[in-house]
Amino acid sequence: MLTMEKLIAFCRSRGFIYSGSEIYGGLANTWDYGPLGVEIKNSIKQAWWKFFVHEDKNSVGMDGGILMNPNVWVASGHVAGFSDPLMDCKSCKTRQRADNLISNSKQGKEIDPDAMSVEELEKFILDNKLVCPNCGKIDWTNIRQFNLMFKTSRSAVADVENTVYLRPETAQSQFVNFQNLQRTSRLKLPFGVGQIGKAFRNEITPGNFIFRTVEFEQMEYQLFCKEQESMDFYNEYKQKANEFYTKRLGIKQENIRFENHENLAHYAKAAVDAEYLYPFGWGEIGGTHHRGTFDLGNHQRDSKKSMEYQPEGAEKFVPTVIESSHGCDRIFLATLLDAYNEEEVSPGDTRVVLKLKPNLAPYTVAVLPLQKKNLTEKSEEVWSNLSKHFSVTYDETGSIGKRYRRQDEIGTPICLTVDYQTLEDNTVTLRDRDTMEQIRVKIDDLFTKIASII
Ligand code: ATP
Protein backbone atom coordinates (compact mmCIF):
# COMPACT_ATOMS: atom_id res chain seq x y z
CA MET A 1 0.00 0.00 0.00
CA LEU A 2 1.13 3.54 -0.70
CA THR A 3 1.59 5.27 2.64
CA MET A 4 2.20 8.99 3.08
CA GLU A 5 5.74 8.22 4.32
CA LYS A 6 6.49 6.29 1.15
CA LEU A 7 5.04 9.01 -1.06
CA ILE A 8 7.00 11.75 0.74
CA ALA A 9 10.24 9.77 0.34
CA PHE A 10 9.41 9.22 -3.34
CA CYS A 11 8.68 12.92 -3.90
CA ARG A 12 11.90 13.99 -2.18
CA SER A 13 14.18 11.55 -3.94
CA ARG A 14 12.84 12.12 -7.45
CA GLY A 15 12.62 15.92 -7.27
CA PHE A 16 8.89 16.47 -6.94
CA ILE A 17 8.93 18.17 -3.53
CA TYR A 18 11.64 19.01 -0.98
CA SER A 19 11.36 20.13 2.64
CA GLY A 20 11.52 23.93 2.88
CA SER A 21 14.88 25.48 3.91
CA GLU A 22 16.32 21.99 4.38
CA ILE A 23 19.98 23.00 4.88
CA TYR A 24 18.98 25.10 7.93
CA GLY A 25 17.08 22.26 9.52
CA GLY A 26 13.88 23.17 7.68
CA LEU A 27 10.88 25.22 8.73
CA ALA A 28 8.02 23.04 9.95
CA ASN A 29 5.39 22.27 7.32
CA THR A 30 6.94 24.26 4.50
CA TRP A 31 7.71 22.57 1.22
CA ASP A 32 9.39 23.51 -2.06
CA TYR A 33 8.32 22.08 -5.40
CA GLY A 34 11.30 20.71 -7.33
CA PRO A 35 11.82 20.34 -11.11
CA LEU A 36 9.21 17.61 -11.60
CA GLY A 37 6.75 18.97 -9.06
CA VAL A 38 6.62 22.44 -10.56
CA GLU A 39 5.85 20.98 -14.00
CA ILE A 40 2.89 19.00 -12.68
CA LYS A 41 1.64 21.89 -10.56
CA ASN A 42 1.81 24.27 -13.53
CA SER A 43 -0.06 21.74 -15.67
CA ILE A 44 -2.80 21.39 -13.04
CA LYS A 45 -3.18 25.16 -12.96
CA GLN A 46 -3.26 25.34 -16.76
CA ALA A 47 -5.88 22.57 -16.92
CA TRP A 48 -7.99 24.42 -14.35
CA TRP A 49 -7.66 27.76 -16.13
CA LYS A 50 -8.55 26.19 -19.48
CA PHE A 51 -11.58 24.41 -18.08
CA PHE A 52 -12.98 27.18 -15.88
CA VAL A 53 -11.89 30.32 -17.72
CA HIS A 54 -10.96 29.72 -21.36
CA GLU A 55 -13.60 27.15 -22.28
CA ASP A 56 -16.43 29.34 -21.02
CA LYS A 57 -17.26 32.39 -23.07
CA ASN A 58 -18.77 34.11 -20.04
CA SER A 59 -15.58 33.88 -18.02
CA VAL A 60 -12.51 36.02 -17.57
CA GLY A 61 -9.49 35.80 -15.28
CA MET A 62 -7.58 38.09 -12.96
CA ASP A 63 -4.51 38.08 -10.72
CA GLY A 64 -4.99 40.12 -7.57
CA GLY A 65 -2.40 41.14 -4.98
CA ILE A 66 -1.64 39.19 -1.83
CA LEU A 67 -1.81 42.36 0.29
CA MET A 68 -5.12 44.22 0.37
CA ASN A 69 -6.56 47.11 2.32
CA PRO A 70 -7.22 45.72 5.85
CA ASN A 71 -10.83 46.90 5.60
CA VAL A 72 -11.39 44.15 3.02
CA TRP A 73 -10.89 41.59 5.79
CA VAL A 74 -13.17 43.44 8.16
CA ALA A 75 -15.98 43.48 5.56
CA SER A 76 -15.41 39.84 4.60
CA GLY A 77 -15.79 38.79 8.24
CA HIS A 78 -12.26 37.37 8.51
CA VAL A 79 -11.05 39.80 11.19
CA ALA A 80 -13.94 38.95 13.49
CA GLY A 81 -14.61 35.35 12.65
CA PHE A 82 -11.79 33.52 10.85
CA SER A 83 -10.55 31.66 13.88
CA ASP A 84 -10.04 28.22 15.34
CA PRO A 85 -10.95 27.27 18.94
CA LEU A 86 -7.69 26.37 20.68
CA MET A 87 -6.79 24.76 23.99
CA ASP A 88 -3.32 24.43 25.46
CA CYS A 89 -2.28 21.31 27.31
CA LYS A 90 -0.75 22.69 30.52
CA SER A 91 1.19 19.49 31.01
CA CYS A 92 3.12 19.17 27.72
CA LYS A 93 2.52 22.74 26.46
CA THR A 94 1.18 21.67 23.05
CA ARG A 95 -1.69 23.56 21.44
CA GLN A 96 -4.69 21.64 20.12
CA ARG A 97 -7.84 22.52 18.18
CA ALA A 98 -10.85 21.80 20.36
CA ASP A 99 -13.01 20.84 17.35
CA ASN A 100 -10.39 18.33 16.16
CA LEU A 101 -10.03 16.83 19.65
CA ILE A 102 -13.74 16.02 19.53
CA SER A 103 -14.00 14.77 15.96
CA ASN A 104 -10.88 12.59 16.40
CA SER A 105 -12.20 10.98 19.62
CA LYS A 106 -14.38 7.87 19.67
CA GLN A 107 -16.98 9.69 21.79
CA GLY A 108 -17.14 12.45 19.18
CA LYS A 109 -17.65 10.31 16.09
CA GLU A 110 -21.29 11.32 15.65
CA ILE A 111 -20.80 14.91 16.80
CA ASP A 112 -20.42 17.95 14.55
CA PRO A 113 -18.13 20.33 16.51
CA ASP A 114 -18.68 23.13 13.96
CA ALA A 115 -22.23 23.42 15.26
CA MET A 116 -21.14 23.84 18.91
CA SER A 117 -20.52 27.01 20.87
CA VAL A 118 -17.24 27.48 22.75
CA GLU A 119 -18.99 26.55 26.01
CA GLU A 120 -20.40 23.37 24.47
CA LEU A 121 -17.00 22.37 23.09
CA GLU A 122 -15.37 22.85 26.49
CA LYS A 123 -18.12 20.95 28.30
CA PHE A 124 -17.95 18.03 25.87
CA ILE A 125 -14.15 17.75 26.23
CA LEU A 126 -14.30 17.82 30.04
CA ASP A 127 -17.39 15.56 30.40
CA ASN A 128 -15.91 12.97 28.07
CA LYS A 129 -12.45 13.26 29.63
CA LEU A 130 -10.72 13.77 26.29
CA VAL A 131 -6.97 13.43 26.77
CA CYS A 132 -4.15 15.36 25.12
CA PRO A 133 -3.13 13.41 21.98
CA ASN A 134 0.50 14.32 22.67
CA CYS A 135 0.98 13.36 26.35
CA GLY A 136 -2.22 11.53 27.30
CA LYS A 137 -3.00 13.86 30.25
CA ILE A 138 -6.12 15.90 30.97
CA ASP A 139 -4.92 19.38 31.92
CA TRP A 140 -6.57 21.83 29.55
CA THR A 141 -6.72 25.62 29.55
CA ASN A 142 -10.00 27.24 28.53
CA ILE A 143 -10.68 27.63 24.83
CA ARG A 144 -9.39 30.75 23.11
CA GLN A 145 -10.26 31.80 19.59
CA PHE A 146 -7.12 32.11 17.48
CA ASN A 147 -7.32 34.14 14.25
CA LEU A 148 -5.77 32.31 11.31
CA MET A 149 -4.72 35.37 9.35
CA PHE A 150 -1.01 36.14 9.13
CA LYS A 151 -0.30 39.72 10.10
CA THR A 152 2.52 41.80 8.80
CA SER A 153 3.41 45.45 8.98
CA ARG A 154 3.80 47.87 6.10
CA SER A 155 6.39 50.18 7.56
CA ALA A 156 9.45 49.84 9.74
CA VAL A 157 7.44 50.77 12.82
CA ALA A 158 4.89 48.14 13.63
CA ASP A 159 1.65 49.46 15.04
CA VAL A 160 -1.98 48.62 14.69
CA GLU A 161 -2.58 51.16 11.94
CA ASN A 162 0.11 49.67 9.75
CA THR A 163 -1.07 46.12 10.11
CA VAL A 164 -1.82 44.36 6.87
CA TYR A 165 -2.75 40.72 6.36
CA LEU A 166 -1.46 38.11 3.98
CA ARG A 167 -4.67 37.08 2.23
CA PRO A 168 -6.20 33.88 3.63
CA GLU A 169 -8.12 33.29 0.37
CA THR A 170 -7.91 34.68 -3.15
CA ALA A 171 -11.65 35.28 -3.57
CA GLN A 172 -11.84 38.78 -2.08
CA SER A 173 -10.01 40.42 -4.99
CA GLN A 174 -12.68 39.12 -7.36
CA PHE A 175 -15.34 40.66 -5.09
CA VAL A 176 -13.75 44.06 -4.53
CA ASN A 177 -13.03 44.35 -8.27
CA PHE A 178 -16.55 43.37 -9.28
CA GLN A 179 -17.33 46.70 -10.94
CA ASN A 180 -13.94 46.93 -12.68
CA LEU A 181 -14.28 43.40 -13.99
CA GLN A 182 -17.83 43.84 -15.22
CA ARG A 183 -17.27 47.23 -16.79
CA THR A 184 -13.96 46.53 -18.54
CA SER A 185 -14.93 43.13 -19.91
CA ARG A 186 -18.48 44.30 -20.76
CA LEU A 187 -19.88 40.98 -19.57
CA LYS A 188 -23.53 40.57 -18.77
CA LEU A 189 -24.77 38.47 -15.90
CA PRO A 190 -24.23 35.56 -15.46
CA PHE A 191 -20.46 35.77 -15.75
CA GLY A 192 -17.53 34.37 -13.85
CA VAL A 193 -14.00 35.33 -12.83
CA GLY A 194 -11.19 32.85 -12.19
CA GLN A 195 -8.07 33.46 -10.17
CA ILE A 196 -5.09 31.37 -9.11
CA GLY A 197 -2.72 32.47 -6.38
CA LYS A 198 -1.12 32.02 -3.00
CA ALA A 199 -3.06 32.17 0.23
CA PHE A 200 -1.77 32.03 3.80
CA ARG A 201 -3.30 30.68 7.00
CA ASN A 202 -1.64 30.39 10.36
CA GLU A 203 -2.88 26.83 10.82
CA ILE A 204 -2.26 25.53 14.33
CA THR A 205 -2.15 21.91 13.34
CA PRO A 206 -0.66 21.77 9.85
CA GLY A 207 0.38 18.40 8.56
CA ASN A 208 -0.07 15.45 6.26
CA PHE A 209 2.65 16.71 3.93
CA ILE A 210 1.24 19.36 1.54
CA PHE A 211 -2.37 18.70 2.60
CA ARG A 212 -2.43 21.37 5.31
CA THR A 213 0.26 24.02 5.17
CA VAL A 214 0.45 27.65 6.16
CA GLU A 215 1.21 28.83 2.62
CA PHE A 216 -0.67 27.24 -0.26
CA GLU A 217 -2.16 27.94 -3.64
CA GLN A 218 -5.84 28.29 -4.44
CA MET A 219 -7.72 28.18 -7.74
CA GLU A 220 -10.98 30.05 -7.17
CA TYR A 221 -13.81 30.89 -9.50
CA GLN A 222 -16.66 33.27 -8.63
CA LEU A 223 -19.81 33.20 -10.72
CA PHE A 224 -21.99 36.31 -10.46
CA CYS A 225 -25.64 35.65 -11.24
CA LYS A 226 -29.26 36.45 -10.42
CA GLU A 227 -30.66 34.99 -7.24
CA GLN A 228 -33.43 33.14 -9.17
CA GLU A 229 -30.93 31.09 -11.20
CA SER A 230 -28.35 30.61 -8.46
CA MET A 231 -29.32 27.08 -7.32
CA ASP A 232 -29.13 25.80 -10.90
CA PHE A 233 -25.63 27.24 -11.18
CA TYR A 234 -24.72 25.80 -7.80
CA ASN A 235 -25.61 22.31 -9.03
CA GLU A 236 -23.88 22.90 -12.35
CA TYR A 237 -20.64 23.98 -10.65
CA LYS A 238 -20.71 21.04 -8.30
CA GLN A 239 -20.85 18.76 -11.37
CA LYS A 240 -18.19 20.83 -13.04
CA ALA A 241 -15.82 20.31 -10.11
CA ASN A 242 -16.34 16.56 -10.38
CA GLU A 243 -15.69 16.66 -14.10
CA PHE A 244 -12.49 18.62 -13.52
CA TYR A 245 -11.15 16.10 -11.01
CA THR A 246 -12.09 12.95 -12.88
CA LYS A 247 -12.03 13.86 -16.58
CA ARG A 248 -9.44 16.61 -16.74
CA LEU A 249 -7.07 15.34 -14.05
CA GLY A 250 -7.84 11.64 -14.37
CA ILE A 251 -8.57 11.03 -10.66
CA LYS A 252 -10.62 7.86 -10.15
CA GLN A 253 -14.30 8.55 -9.44
CA GLU A 254 -14.37 6.10 -6.52
CA ASN A 255 -11.77 8.24 -4.74
CA ILE A 256 -13.90 11.40 -4.89
CA ARG A 257 -16.98 12.10 -2.81
CA PHE A 258 -19.13 15.13 -2.08
CA GLU A 259 -20.18 16.03 1.45
CA ASN A 260 -22.82 18.68 2.05
CA HIS A 261 -22.12 21.21 4.82
CA GLU A 262 -24.52 20.49 7.63
CA ASN A 263 -24.23 23.89 9.23
CA LEU A 264 -24.54 26.57 6.65
CA ALA A 265 -23.38 30.10 7.18
CA HIS A 266 -26.40 32.35 7.72
CA TYR A 267 -26.08 33.86 4.22
CA ALA A 268 -25.55 30.58 2.33
CA LYS A 269 -28.23 28.51 0.64
CA ALA A 270 -25.99 25.49 0.07
CA ALA A 271 -22.36 24.39 0.33
CA VAL A 272 -20.62 21.15 -0.48
CA ASP A 273 -17.04 19.92 -0.02
CA ALA A 274 -15.35 17.69 -2.56
CA GLU A 275 -13.17 15.15 -0.78
CA TYR A 276 -10.43 12.77 -1.89
CA LEU A 277 -9.64 9.46 -0.22
CA TYR A 278 -6.08 10.08 0.99
CA PRO A 279 -4.07 7.36 2.81
CA PHE A 280 -5.04 9.18 6.06
CA GLY A 281 -8.76 9.22 5.17
CA TRP A 282 -11.16 11.49 3.32
CA GLY A 283 -9.93 15.08 3.07
CA GLU A 284 -11.28 18.21 1.41
CA ILE A 285 -9.81 19.21 -1.95
CA GLY A 286 -12.35 21.82 -2.99
CA GLY A 287 -15.80 23.21 -2.46
CA THR A 288 -18.81 24.67 -4.20
CA HIS A 289 -20.42 27.42 -2.15
CA HIS A 290 -23.59 29.41 -2.59
CA ARG A 291 -22.48 32.70 -1.04
CA GLY A 292 -25.64 34.69 -1.65
CA THR A 293 -25.04 38.46 -1.73
CA PHE A 294 -22.94 38.32 1.42
CA ASP A 295 -19.58 39.36 -0.03
CA LEU A 296 -20.69 42.03 -2.49
CA GLY A 297 -23.27 43.31 -0.01
CA ASN A 298 -20.68 43.68 2.77
CA HIS A 299 -18.21 45.45 0.51
CA GLN A 300 -20.95 47.78 -0.66
CA ARG A 301 -21.84 48.56 2.97
CA ASP A 302 -18.25 49.14 4.14
CA SER A 303 -16.72 50.81 1.07
CA LYS A 304 -19.87 52.82 0.34
CA LYS A 305 -19.30 51.99 -3.34
CA SER A 306 -22.09 50.40 -5.31
CA MET A 307 -21.73 46.69 -5.99
CA GLU A 308 -24.96 46.60 -7.93
CA TYR A 309 -25.47 45.35 -11.44
CA GLN A 310 -27.70 47.28 -13.81
CA PRO A 311 -29.55 45.07 -16.31
CA GLU A 312 -31.05 46.74 -19.38
CA GLY A 313 -34.50 48.05 -18.65
CA ALA A 314 -34.75 46.55 -15.18
CA GLU A 315 -34.04 47.36 -11.54
CA LYS A 316 -30.41 47.16 -10.44
CA PHE A 317 -29.44 44.62 -7.78
CA VAL A 318 -26.48 43.08 -5.93
CA PRO A 319 -25.63 39.81 -7.69
CA THR A 320 -25.54 36.43 -5.98
CA VAL A 321 -22.24 34.53 -5.98
CA ILE A 322 -21.59 30.85 -6.61
CA GLU A 323 -18.02 29.98 -5.72
CA SER A 324 -16.00 27.04 -7.01
CA SER A 325 -12.90 26.86 -4.84
CA HIS A 326 -10.00 24.41 -5.22
CA GLY A 327 -6.73 23.83 -3.38
CA CYS A 328 -3.94 23.36 -5.88
CA ASP A 329 -1.56 21.60 -3.49
CA ARG A 330 -4.21 19.19 -2.19
CA ILE A 331 -5.19 18.41 -5.79
CA PHE A 332 -1.52 17.88 -6.67
CA LEU A 333 -1.28 15.38 -3.81
CA ALA A 334 -4.47 13.59 -4.88
CA THR A 335 -3.35 13.45 -8.51
CA LEU A 336 0.02 11.96 -7.58
CA LEU A 337 -1.44 9.40 -5.17
CA ASP A 338 -4.05 8.38 -7.71
CA ALA A 339 -1.51 7.95 -10.51
CA TYR A 340 1.03 5.97 -8.46
CA ASN A 341 1.15 2.26 -9.33
CA GLU A 342 3.48 -0.60 -8.55
CA GLU A 343 3.20 -3.26 -11.25
CA GLU A 344 4.72 -6.72 -11.43
CA VAL A 345 6.22 -6.78 -14.93
CA SER A 346 7.44 -10.39 -14.59
CA PRO A 347 7.76 -12.64 -11.52
CA GLY A 348 9.96 -10.84 -9.00
CA ASP A 349 10.30 -7.71 -11.17
CA THR A 350 8.18 -4.76 -10.11
CA ARG A 351 8.11 -1.33 -11.70
CA VAL A 352 6.81 1.94 -10.28
CA VAL A 353 4.75 3.77 -12.86
CA LEU A 354 3.00 7.12 -12.51
CA LYS A 355 -0.04 6.84 -14.75
CA LEU A 356 -0.56 10.57 -15.03
CA LYS A 357 -2.69 11.93 -17.82
CA PRO A 358 -0.18 12.81 -20.57
CA ASN A 359 -0.95 16.54 -20.36
CA LEU A 360 -0.02 16.52 -16.63
CA ALA A 361 3.22 14.53 -16.87
CA PRO A 362 6.39 16.58 -16.19
CA TYR A 363 7.77 15.46 -19.54
CA THR A 364 5.80 14.28 -22.56
CA VAL A 365 8.77 12.63 -24.25
CA ALA A 366 12.13 11.29 -23.10
CA VAL A 367 14.77 11.11 -25.83
CA LEU A 368 17.09 8.19 -25.12
CA PRO A 369 20.07 7.41 -27.35
CA LEU A 370 20.57 3.62 -27.20
CA GLN A 371 24.29 4.24 -26.80
CA LYS A 372 26.36 7.40 -26.54
CA LYS A 373 28.73 6.34 -29.30
CA ASN A 374 27.78 7.87 -32.68
CA LEU A 375 24.17 8.52 -31.62
CA THR A 376 24.49 11.72 -29.58
CA GLU A 377 24.39 14.14 -32.50
CA LYS A 378 21.26 12.64 -34.03
CA SER A 379 19.58 12.34 -30.62
CA GLU A 380 20.27 15.97 -29.75
CA GLU A 381 18.84 17.03 -33.08
CA VAL A 382 15.63 15.08 -32.38
CA TRP A 383 15.47 16.52 -28.84
CA SER A 384 15.99 20.05 -30.10
CA ASN A 385 13.24 19.81 -32.73
CA LEU A 386 10.71 18.22 -30.38
CA SER A 387 11.41 20.56 -27.49
CA LYS A 388 9.95 23.42 -29.52
CA HIS A 389 6.56 21.70 -29.33
CA PHE A 390 6.58 19.42 -26.28
CA SER A 391 8.13 19.17 -22.85
CA VAL A 392 11.08 16.85 -23.59
CA THR A 393 13.83 15.42 -21.41
CA TYR A 394 17.08 13.78 -22.47
CA ASP A 395 18.83 10.89 -20.77
CA GLU A 396 21.84 8.96 -21.98
CA THR A 397 23.13 7.44 -18.72
CA GLY A 398 22.65 3.81 -17.71
CA SER A 399 21.18 0.83 -19.51
CA ILE A 400 18.12 1.44 -21.68
CA GLY A 401 16.03 -0.75 -19.34
CA LYS A 402 16.97 1.38 -16.33
CA ARG A 403 16.21 4.55 -18.27
CA TYR A 404 12.75 3.27 -19.22
CA ARG A 405 12.05 2.57 -15.54
CA ARG A 406 13.26 6.03 -14.54
CA GLN A 407 10.81 7.58 -16.97
CA ASP A 408 7.96 5.27 -15.90
CA GLU A 409 8.48 6.41 -12.30
CA ILE A 410 8.07 10.06 -13.19
CA GLY A 411 5.16 9.46 -15.54
CA THR A 412 6.71 10.20 -18.96
CA PRO A 413 4.14 8.84 -21.43
CA ILE A 414 6.54 8.33 -24.36
CA CYS A 415 10.14 7.12 -24.46
CA LEU A 416 11.83 7.75 -27.78
CA THR A 417 14.91 5.67 -28.55
CA VAL A 418 17.47 6.60 -31.15
CA ASP A 419 19.50 3.57 -32.32
CA TYR A 420 21.79 2.60 -35.16
CA GLN A 421 18.89 1.91 -37.47
CA THR A 422 17.95 5.60 -37.03
CA LEU A 423 21.15 6.59 -38.80
CA GLU A 424 20.20 4.36 -41.73
CA ASP A 425 16.48 4.95 -42.24
CA ASN A 426 15.63 8.03 -40.09
CA THR A 427 13.22 6.13 -37.85
CA VAL A 428 13.07 5.89 -34.02
CA THR A 429 11.16 3.69 -31.57
CA LEU A 430 8.38 5.07 -29.38
CA ARG A 431 7.60 3.15 -26.20
CA ASP A 432 4.26 3.57 -24.47
CA ARG A 433 4.52 4.03 -20.67
CA ASP A 434 1.41 2.04 -19.77
CA THR A 435 1.48 -0.88 -22.26
CA MET A 436 5.29 -0.83 -22.70
CA GLU A 437 4.68 -1.59 -26.38
CA GLN A 438 7.08 -0.18 -28.93
CA ILE A 439 6.49 1.05 -32.45
CA ARG A 440 8.85 2.30 -35.13
CA VAL A 441 8.10 5.79 -36.43
CA LYS A 442 9.70 8.01 -39.07
CA ILE A 443 11.32 11.13 -37.60
CA ASP A 444 9.37 13.22 -40.12
CA ASP A 445 6.10 11.88 -38.66
CA LEU A 446 7.06 12.36 -35.00
CA PHE A 447 5.14 15.55 -34.34
CA THR A 448 1.84 14.18 -35.67
CA LYS A 449 2.34 10.81 -33.96
CA ILE A 450 3.17 12.28 -30.53
CA ALA A 451 0.37 14.83 -30.79
CA SER A 452 -2.10 12.03 -31.54
CA ILE A 453 -0.86 9.94 -28.59
CA ILE A 454 -1.20 12.75 -26.07
P1 ATP B 1 -10.23 22.89 5.89
O1 ATP B 1 -11.61 22.65 6.43
O2 ATP B 1 -9.53 21.62 5.40
O3 ATP B 1 -9.36 23.73 6.76
P2 ATP B 1 -11.41 25.02 4.43
O4 ATP B 1 -12.85 24.59 4.36
O5 ATP B 1 -11.03 26.03 5.45
O6 ATP B 1 -10.43 23.75 4.54
P3 ATP B 1 -11.61 26.72 2.14
O7 ATP B 1 -11.59 27.97 2.95
O8 ATP B 1 -12.89 26.30 1.52
O9 ATP B 1 -10.97 25.52 2.98
O10 ATP B 1 -10.46 26.86 1.02
C1 ATP B 1 -10.60 26.35 -0.29
C2 ATP B 1 -9.59 25.26 -0.57
O11 ATP B 1 -8.26 25.68 -0.25
C3 ATP B 1 -9.81 24.00 0.24
O12 ATP B 1 -10.77 23.16 -0.35
C4 ATP B 1 -8.44 23.36 0.21
O13 ATP B 1 -8.26 22.60 -0.96
C5 ATP B 1 -7.49 24.55 0.18
N1 ATP B 1 -6.93 24.80 1.51
C6 ATP B 1 -7.52 25.41 2.56
N2 ATP B 1 -6.70 25.47 3.61
C7 ATP B 1 -5.52 24.89 3.22
C8 ATP B 1 -4.27 24.65 3.85
N3 ATP B 1 -4.03 25.06 5.10
N4 ATP B 1 -3.31 24.01 3.15
C9 ATP B 1 -3.51 23.61 1.88
N5 ATP B 1 -4.67 23.82 1.22
C10 ATP B 1 -5.66 24.45 1.87
Image: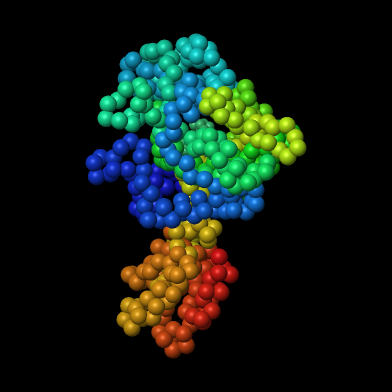
Q: Nearer the viewer, residue 321 or 141?
A: 321
The mark total stands at 0
Where is residue 235 drawn, in percent x and y?
A: 69, 39
Q: Residue drawn 30% across and 30% down? A: 155
Specify whether 286 is left or right of 8. Answer: right
| Residue 357 against residue 7 in the figure, above or below | below
Q: Nearer the viewer, residue 285 or 266?
A: 266
| Residue 27 against residue 445 in the figure, above or below | above
Q: Residue drawn 45% across and 72% down? A: 386
| Residue 13 against residue 373 in the figure, above or below | above
Q: Residue drawn 63% across and 40% down? A: 223
- Coloration mode: rainbow
View extreme (bottom): residue: 424
Where is residue 87 drawn, in percent x and y?
A: 41, 18
| Residue 236 against residue 420 in the figure, above or below | above
Q: Residue drawn 59% across and 30% down? A: 306
